Amino acid sequence: MSAVAPAPAAPPISGVLETGLYVDDLPRARAFYEGVLGLRPMIADHRFCAYDAGPGSVLLLFLRGATLEAVTMPGGTIPGHDGHGPLHYALAIPAGSLDAWIAHLAGQGVAVESRVNWKGGGASLYFRDPDGHLVELATPGLWANY
């Protein structure tokens, strides 16, 4: 029997740069993300909108079905993509801001579905965007690295 050589180590990953959500109505989704969450677009067109979601992080909203075809740009080609179903993602918020977020969401008519207090000291709020995606706002202490 011959020994199997271990796989070479993967090069390092330094973080998650983009999170993409697919929405049915881009203007409606933009109204939620800009009006309720206070995000500001960095770039947008009829197919997508890119938001600054904190240092080194971008939240992308794509109009469902509008990005199925590859897009060729001067620097290369972005392959087609799409997605369906309610997704989940979390946005980092400062410690101590949970109550302010609860009040802000209530004032915007957004129902909080759940609140979780984590063993590490963090807390999370969960609510839905207009497309049914589960949005989490999380304070430090949720994960060992956050």
Image (tube, rainbow, N blue to C red):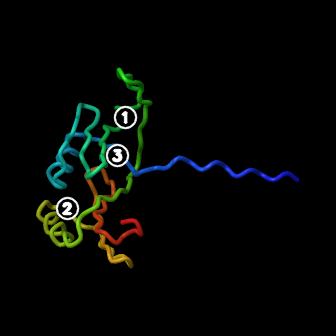
Crowding at mark 3 (Cα within 10 Å: few <14, some 14-19, many 20+): many
Crowding at mark 2 (Cα within 10 Å: few <14, some 14-19, many 20+): some
Residue 1, image x and y in percent?
88, 53
- Name the residue at the top extreme: 74
Nearer to the camera, 97 or 24: 97
Does residue 101 appear left or right of residue 2 in this picture? Answer: left
Q: Quadrant of residue 40?
A: top left
Residue 134, image x and y in percent?
33, 58
Mark 3 — residue?
Answer: 21
User: Compared to 124, does 3 lie above or below?
Assistant: above
Q: Residue at x 42, y 25 (%)?
A: 77
Q: What type is the residue that disc 1 sits on?
A: Gly
User: Compared to 18, does 36 lie above or below?
Assistant: below
Q: What type is the residue that disc 3 sits on?
A: Leu
Tell me the element at label 3: strand
Give the number of the disc on residue 123.
none
Q: Say whether disc 1 or disc 3 marks the residue closer to the N-terminus.
A: 3
Tell me the element at label 2: loop
Does residue 18 appear left or right of residue 55 in this picture? Answer: right
Mark 3 vs mark 2: give the one in front.
Answer: 3
Nearer to the camera, 110 or 94: 94
Using the numbered discs, state the Cα–Cα distance from disc 3 to disc 2 in whole angstroms: 19 Å
Q: Residue at x 31, y 49 (%)?
A: 57
Does residue 16 appear left or right of residue 45 in this picture? Answer: right
Mark 1 — residue?
Answer: 65
Does the CB distance between marks 1 and 3 fall below 8 Å?
Answer: no
Does residue 24 appear left or right of residue 96 in this picture? Answer: right
Q: Say whether disc 3 or disc 2 marks the residue closer to the N-terminus.
A: 3
Does the CB distance between marks 1 and 2 fall below 8 Å?
Answer: no
Mark 2 — residue?
Answer: 110
Q: What type is the residue that disc 2 sits on?
A: Val
